[in-house]
């Protein structure tokens, strides 16, 4: 197991370097805005443009810029400085992680609490009204875009402009250690909105997996042995059916920890996703790089965790 | 020495063109806002309730707190409340007032020397805690010429100061400018290499003249780029929260700016009433509809950092929430630029035909229609000297027939197209362009600019022009395409220029002087390079502010319009919203709320 983890970690480093290179390449190749010109104001002299280009290091060939970026990252854990305001990328991104983590983990809890039981119920109650209703609702949940659902929920339930003012929806986020009540009330609606589509997907996935598993011979054997149906379903059926869900859960959580761009933007949650959104709009490569790296790290890490978890969930998997 | 009156001083203002929003039509007033703006609910300038806290909802962040680097409207708004420049603008007044200065600047008869007397006792915030002197202003100007403090306008407006480097240098190589003299703590003498004192004096309203204490700032300025932005000290009625060492703690980029009273501020030295106790700027409110609705229905809120609320909200606000809507002339013109170096736009008759046939009223609808301001008739907008002399909202329609009908005149357009045909332009007998190949057009990919471009495309097609239509983000549009002559973009449908100074020169020189064409960051989008117009501009630039100057620039405006380099279509105002309990005051200088004059009811 230890060798497996070490090998995976080493590969992860290679993968992250590749991701930074790819981001850099996309920025250089695609016609994004010129950061020096953006920074120079609207009617700059050629001298000021040249000066800013030099200050930002943009006067050097792209591979030199990339090498310097990589060197600073590896040797000093320095993510560089924003092209827009010259602030440290590390100081810009890291304080935003609690917001993103809060949103992602909270959302994940909500969608698991909804998605898994609904999926199980739909599989067990196959062909009934309950299944049809649950799967119909899931289809609606999958079809509703997060930004639309977010805006609708704000107009319906936010305390300032909602028809039924229940939740503090936008711009109210506070870190839990500063104001726990505000943190909680500002995240309830985003959690629900974020969880809707995931819950729907997980419910459908869980249902189809479980239906498949429940047709397996060992389930029939379990029933033949006289086990109660609840035990058959939960102990033997769900345990097997949930394995693929663990895989996608790890990936989904990793992606969200890299920033739930739409949810964070709609609800004005100062997380990594919103930072990425702003940075992309301003062609602020160092910040884009930073957010991409955080996102990629989260995905790689959660993939690793999932692979390790497999060993515990599925006895057939051994490292 | 002659005394430069306040009215003659030209205010400076920068507006991020990209930040201005818009929408669809209305049919009310054709008039632009009054020069001083309209404050909601008839709020009286200088009167208000002392105390209270306001939250300002913004989408973006300020560019910089460092007065040597800030360059955009939002940054100017925060700077004006927290740091004082030599001259400033009271809301509702057209001319600047001495702020840090004790009186108007004195200009020598040869227009090469400016003498400024400063008020004593204007103190810096902690940890500096001493009075600002002329040496601090001298250092502030000098540092703006260094690569460590990249300043977007120092080399444009202050290049003639004796001893100023021609291009940005390292702060390590910075030597005191011989043209900045400080005989005592309250006197600053500016010596110039050319007789441009009126312009330089006018530019002292810019944040470059905010004092910076060298002994405190030099360790931050030694960094490349300077980190003074994170350690700014303040002279205004407010300060951004900071710790005892001066490190700014109240700014979390993209999230929040916490502004509180500056305990070192002495009200007797300032014209700002500074009613509010604190201002909390909440950033990240990207969805303007949500932000404006929150403002209208909420308490103690002001909104937003873009030029206009979304049009449905604006339309409702113009009728139902008038008392919560502030309005001020934006001092800018929007137009569709045609590149005169690219065929067939190198032909005057083709350009005249296009302008004549264009439904400019339809273009304006995409920006909000009549309710937000008049159709542009030229390139000097309302509120800028030379506007009345250019015929105001009527423009030059009496003498330039192709500008007469803003709804478009198909017959006249045909006439000009057929005239172009005689000059060898491929035009069919029914007056339609018959040239081959698409015409490269780069438009913004988001509304309202995208709608404007699409209407423009439709109008061009009426005369047979097939646009090769490409959509890119607004910043990319300027920095990679329309602002780069080498990119050879034929049509830029989303350009606009907003006042740097309340002076016609700042409207016409950057955008239509042939000498202003640059390889990058070019804003003479049409690449108009007419020797006669260039010479007229050079001559008019030396005329002192007043009627003669206004007439001279109005005549240049007419010459430019006669060349039909673009299709001007909108002189829209800037609008801002507030909650019912807020007594907001608009400032025509930075075209948004003035935090130092606004109060709670």
Image (cartoon, rainbow, N blue to C red):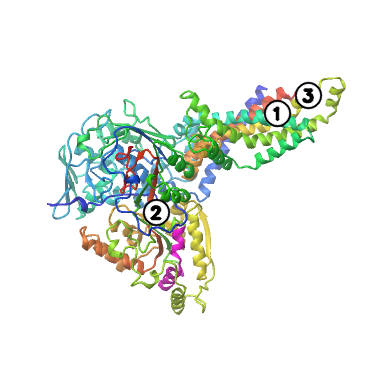
User: Do residues under tags 1 and 3 come within 8 Å of each other at their CB atoms?
Assistant: no
Q: Is residue B99 above or below residue B483?
A: above
Mark 2 lies on a secondary structure that is: loop
**In the depicted view, which residue is nearer to us: B221 or B414?**
B414
- Seen as rendered, the residue at the extreme front is B320
- Seen as rendered, the residue at the extreme right is A224
Overall secondary structure of the magenta section? helix
Nearest-to-viewer mark from 3 and 2: 3
Q: Quadrant of the N terminus of chain A?
A: top right
Q: Quadrant of the C terminus of chain A?
A: top right
In terms of image quadrants, where is residue B351?
A: bottom left
Q: Is residue A58 left or right of residue A153?
A: left
Please give the residue where the numbered disc 1 appears in the rendered image: A117
Decide if residue A136 is in sight here: yes
Please give the residue where the numbered disc 2 appears in the rendered image: B521
**In the depicted view, which residue is nearer to us: B22 or B146?**
B22
Residues packed near mark 2 inside 10 Å, few (<14), some (14 to 19) or many (20 plus): many
Magenta stretch holds residue B150: no
The residue lying at 64 percent from left, 37 percent from top is: A197
Q: Do tags 1 and 3 sit on the same chain? A: yes
**In the depicted view, which residue is nearer to us: B286 or B169?**
B286
Mark 1 lies on a secondary structure that is: helix
Work out how far the residue at label 1 is from the one at label 3, CA to CA, in angstroms.
Answer: 15 Å
Question: Picture coordinates of residue B543 (x, y %)?
Answer: 21, 60
- The disc, 1 or 3, on the residue closer to the chain's N-terminal end is 1
User: Do residues under tags 2 and 1 come within 8 Å of each other at their CB atoms?
Assistant: no
Residue at mark 1: chain = A
Res. B121 mark: none
- Seen as rendered, the residue at the extreme left is B1
Q: Is residue A309 left or right of residue B120?
A: right
Nearest-to-viewer mark from 1 and 3: 1
Q: Which residues are magenta?
A: B343-365
């Amino acid at each position: 197991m230890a060798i497996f983890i070490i090998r995976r970690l080493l590969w992860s480093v290679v993968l992250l370097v590749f991701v930074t290179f790819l981001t850099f390449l996309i920025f250089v190749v695609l016609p994004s805005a010129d950061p020096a010109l953006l920074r120079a104001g609207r009617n700059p002299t050629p001298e000021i443009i040249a000066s800013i280009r030099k200050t930002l290091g943009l006067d050097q060939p792209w591979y030199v810029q990339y090498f310097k970026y990589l060197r600073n990252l590896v040797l000093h854990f320095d993510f560089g400085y924003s092209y827009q305001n010259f602030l440290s990328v590390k100081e810009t991104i890291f304080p935003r992680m609690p917001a993103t983590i809060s949103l992602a983990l909270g959302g994940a809890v909500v969608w698991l609490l909804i998605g898994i039981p609904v999926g199980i119920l739909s599989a067990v109650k196959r062909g009934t009204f309950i299944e049809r209703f649950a799967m119909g609702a899931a289809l609606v949940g999958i079809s509703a875009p997060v930004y639309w659902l977010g805006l609708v929920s704000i107009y319906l339930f936010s305390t300032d402009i909602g028809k039924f003012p229940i939740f503090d929806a936008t711009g109210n986020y506070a870190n839990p250690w500063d104001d726990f009540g505000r943190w909680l009330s500002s995240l309830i609606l985003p959690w629900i909105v974020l969880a809707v589509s995931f819950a729907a997907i997980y419910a459908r996935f869980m249902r189809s997996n479980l239906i498949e598993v429940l047709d397996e011979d060992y389930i029939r054997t379990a029933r033949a042995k006289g086990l109660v149906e609840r035990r058959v379903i939960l102990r033997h059926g769900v345990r097997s059916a949930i394995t693929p869900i663990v895989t996608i859960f790890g990936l989904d959580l990793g992606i969200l920890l890299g920033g739930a761009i739409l949810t964070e933007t709609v609800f004005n949650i100062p997380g990594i996703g919103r930072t990425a959104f702003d940075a992309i709009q301003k062609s602020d490569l160092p910040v884009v790089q930073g957010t991409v790296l955080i996102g990629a790290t989260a995905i790689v890490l959660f993939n690793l965790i999932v692979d390790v978890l497999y060993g515990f969930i599925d006895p057939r998997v051994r490292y | 020495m002659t005394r430069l009156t306040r009215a003659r001083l030209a205010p400076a203002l920068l507006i991020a063109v990209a930040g201005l929003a818009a929408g669809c039509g209305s049919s009310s007033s054709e008039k632009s806002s009054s020069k001083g703006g309209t404050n909601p609910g008839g709020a009286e300038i200088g009167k208000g309730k002392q105390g209270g806290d306001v939250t300002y909802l913004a989408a973006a962040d300020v560019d910089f707190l460092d007065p040597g680097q800030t360059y955009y409207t939002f940054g100017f708004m925060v700077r004006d409340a927290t740091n004082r420049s030599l001259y400033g603008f009271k809301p509702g007044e057209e001319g600047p007032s001495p702020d840090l200065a004790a009186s108007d600047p004195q200009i020598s008869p040869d227009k090469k020397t400016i003498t400024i007397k400063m008020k004593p006792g204007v103190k810096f915030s902690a940890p500096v805690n001493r009075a600002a002197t002329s040496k601090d202003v001298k250092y502030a100007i000098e540092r703006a010429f260094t690569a460590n403090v990249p300043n977007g306008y120092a080399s444009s407006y202050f290049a003639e100061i004796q001893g100023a480097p021609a291009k940005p240098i390292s702060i390590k190589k910075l030597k005191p400018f011989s043209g900045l003299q400080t005989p005592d703590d309250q006197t600053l003498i500016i010596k110039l290499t050319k007789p441009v004192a009126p312009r330089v004096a006018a530019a002292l309203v810019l944040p470059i003249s905010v004092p910076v204490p060298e002994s405190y700032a030099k360790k931050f300025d030694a960094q490349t780029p300077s980190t003074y932005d994170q350690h700014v000290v303040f002279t205004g009625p407010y300060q951004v929260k900071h710790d005892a060492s001066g490190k700014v703690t109240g700014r979390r980029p993209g999230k929040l700016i916490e502004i509180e009273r500056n305990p070192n501020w002495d009200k007797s030295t300032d014209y700002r009433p500074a009613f509010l106790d604190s201002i909390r700027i909440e950033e990240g409110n990207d969805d303007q509809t949500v932000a404006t609705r929150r403002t209208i229905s909420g308490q103690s809120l002001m909104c937003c950092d873009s030029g206009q609320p979304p049009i449905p909200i604006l339309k409702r606000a113009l009728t139902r929430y008038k008392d919560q809507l502030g309005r001020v002339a934006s001092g800018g013109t929007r137009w569709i630029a045609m590149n005169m170096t690219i065929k067939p736009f190198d032909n005057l008759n083709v350009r005249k035909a296009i302008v004549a046939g264009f439904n400019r009223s339809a273009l304006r609808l995409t920006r909000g229609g009549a309710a937000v301001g008049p159709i542009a008739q030229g390139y000097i907008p309302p509120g800028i000297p030379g506007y009345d002399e250019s015929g105001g909202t009527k423009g030059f329609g009496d003498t330039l027939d192709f500008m007469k009908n803003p709804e478009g005149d198909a017959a006249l357009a045909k006439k000009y197209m057929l005239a172009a045909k005689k000059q060898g332009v491929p035009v069919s007998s029914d007056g339609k362009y018959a040239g081959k190949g698409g015409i490269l057009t780069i438009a913004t990919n988001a509304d309202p600019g995208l709608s404007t471009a699409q209407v423009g495309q439709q109008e061009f097609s009426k005369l047979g022009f097939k646009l090769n239509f490409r959509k890119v983000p607004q910043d990319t549009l300027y920095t990679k395409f329309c602002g780069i002559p080498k990119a050879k973009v034929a049509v830029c449908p989303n350009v606009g220029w907003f006042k740097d100074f309340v002076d016609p020169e700042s409207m016409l020189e950057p955008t239509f002087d042939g000498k202003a064409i640059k390889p990058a960051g070019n804003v003479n989008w049409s690449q108009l390079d007419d020797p006669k117009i260039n010479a007229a501009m050079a001559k008019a630039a030396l005329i002192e502010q007043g009627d003669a100057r206004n007439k001279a620039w109005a005549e240049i405006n007419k010459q430019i319009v006669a060349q039909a380099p673009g299709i001007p279509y909108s002189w829209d105002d800037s609008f801002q919203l507030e909650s019912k309990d807020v007594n907001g005051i608009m400032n025509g200088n930075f075209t948004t709320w003035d935090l130092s004059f606004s109060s709670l009811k």
